[in-house]
């Protein structure tokens, strides 16, 4: 009965060892799976970091383009101020000519009044106020965690409650941010082309006005001089109309530029939020991974302790089995020796 009990105990120990081995294999597979999952998470984080760096580079390029665009707008506004003064001078000349020859009547073209801002002096402060930007600032600036060297213009102080929202929030994925950046780049190129065209028209208008000033005839009383002055009055009216159209185009471009700057600021804020969320997600993932690894290590130590305990029990059982078997062999030998008869003396 003791032998049978020992055999059953050994069989139980062997089953426990098999079960422990299966548990260790399962734990190893779980650890391998967790390591693969962690590598996949790290690859995803690296890919997202690359996308964020690409967006930062695009935003840096957009900032430089915006600075160039603001500089072009300042030059156009300076040309606009010169044209304003030329238009006022031409209007005064037209009034003088009309007073000199009232018999010719007014021009057949309906008169168009100049806006009130033509009479305002084009000062540097008024120019920056009309543009909605501050004076240019040179130096290094931080955008989304990256340091950029260049020239920027401060955002306007006016309220932007009526500005169109770009629909960006903290959950905007990087591909949407990239599409928005491409759209802003396209808008910047369009604005630059329009500004170049407007500047070219300004230069042509300035050249035409200078030509008119050079070709202005001296005062006289003959009919040809009166006709030339009447034609000059008509041309002045046409130049006033063209100047008004250019001023309207400049106002439209200024509103578009303001909307573009608003969208750029929203894109920059969304990129900053996305970067912060990525860092928080990475930190949470690292903490969760550390907790899981600690739990796995604890389970591994418990299983190793259990295996060591079962091994010691098995050694004790084998030792007891060997002792019992030796005792059984001694008892068998004793019985055999007692059963044999004593040898007789044949002497």
Image (spheres, grey):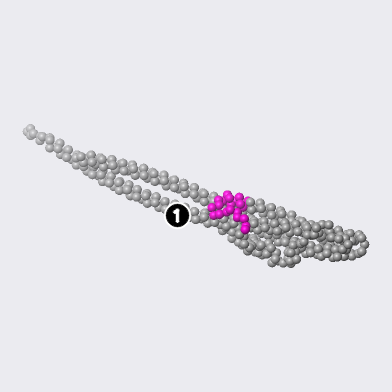
Q: Is residue 163 visible?
A: yes
Residue 139 in percent (x, y) is at 63, 63
When asked about the image quadrant of residue 153, the answer is: bottom right
Instruction: Identify the residue at image location x=78%, y=59%.
Output: 112
Residue 109 in percent (x, y) is at 82, 57
Instruction: Identify the residue at image location x=17%, y=38%.
Output: 332
Which residue is more in the foreground, 213 or 230?
Answer: 230
The answer to whether residue 204 is left or right of residue 252 is right
Instruction: Identify the residue at image location x=81%, y=63%.
Output: 91
Which residue is more in the foreground, 7 or 234?
Answer: 234
Q: Is residue 215 visible?
A: no
The answer to whether residue 304 is left or right of residue 171 is left
Circle 1 is placed at which residue position? 287
Which residue is more in the foreground, 60 or 114?
Answer: 114
Q: Quadrant of the C terminus?
A: top left
Name of the residue lying farthest toward the right: 222
Q: Is residue 278 magenta?
A: no
Instruction: Identify the residue at image location x=33%, y=42%.
Output: 18
Residue 219 in percent (x, y) is at 89, 65
The answer to whether residue 29 is left or right of residue 260 is left
Which residue is more in the foreground, 61 or 118?
Answer: 118
Q: Which residues are magenta?
A: 162-182
């Amino acid at each position: 009965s003791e032998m049978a009990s020992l055999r059953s105990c050994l069989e139980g120990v062997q089953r426990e060892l098999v079960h422990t081995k299966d548990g260790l294999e399962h734990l190893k597979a779980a650890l391998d799976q967790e390591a693969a999952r962690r590598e996949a998470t790290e690859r995803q984080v690296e890919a997202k970091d690359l996308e964020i760096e690409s967006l930062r580079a695009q935003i840096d390029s957009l900032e430089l383009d915006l600075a160039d665009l603001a500089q072009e707008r300042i030059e156009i506004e300076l040309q606009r101020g010169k044209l304003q003064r030329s238009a006022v001078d031409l209007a005064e000349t037209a009034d003088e000519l009309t007073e000199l020859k009232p018999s010719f009547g007014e021009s057949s073209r309906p008169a168009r009044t100049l806006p009130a801002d033509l009479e305002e002096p084009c000062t540097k402060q008024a120019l920056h106020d009309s543009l909605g930007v501050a004076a240019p600032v040179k130096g290094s600036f931080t955008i989304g965690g990256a340091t950029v060297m260049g020239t920027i213009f401060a955002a306007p102080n006016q309220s932007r409650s009526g500005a169109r929202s770009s629909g960006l929030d903290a959950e905007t994925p990087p591909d949407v941010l990239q599409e928005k950046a491409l759209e802003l780049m396209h808008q910047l190129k369009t604005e630059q082309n329009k500004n170049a065209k407007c500047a070219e028209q300004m230069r042509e208008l300035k050249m035409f006005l200078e030509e008119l000033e050079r070709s202005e005839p001296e005062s006289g009383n003959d009919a040809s001089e009166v006709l030339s002055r009447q034609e000059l009055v008509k041309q002045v009216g046409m130049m006033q109309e063209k100047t008004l159209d250019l001023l309207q185009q400049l106002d439209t471009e200024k509103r578009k530029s303001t909307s573009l700057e608003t969208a750029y600021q929203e894109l920059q804020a969304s990129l900053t939020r996305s970067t912060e969320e990525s860092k928080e997600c990475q930190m949470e993932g690292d903490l969760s991974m550390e907790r899981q690894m600690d739990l796995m290590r604890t389970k591994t130590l418990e299983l190793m302790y259990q295996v060591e305990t079962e091994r010691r029990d098995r050694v004790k059982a084998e030792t007891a089995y060997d002792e019992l078997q030796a005792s059984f062999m001694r008892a068998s030998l004793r019985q055999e020796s007692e059963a044999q008869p004593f040898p007789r003396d044949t002497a």
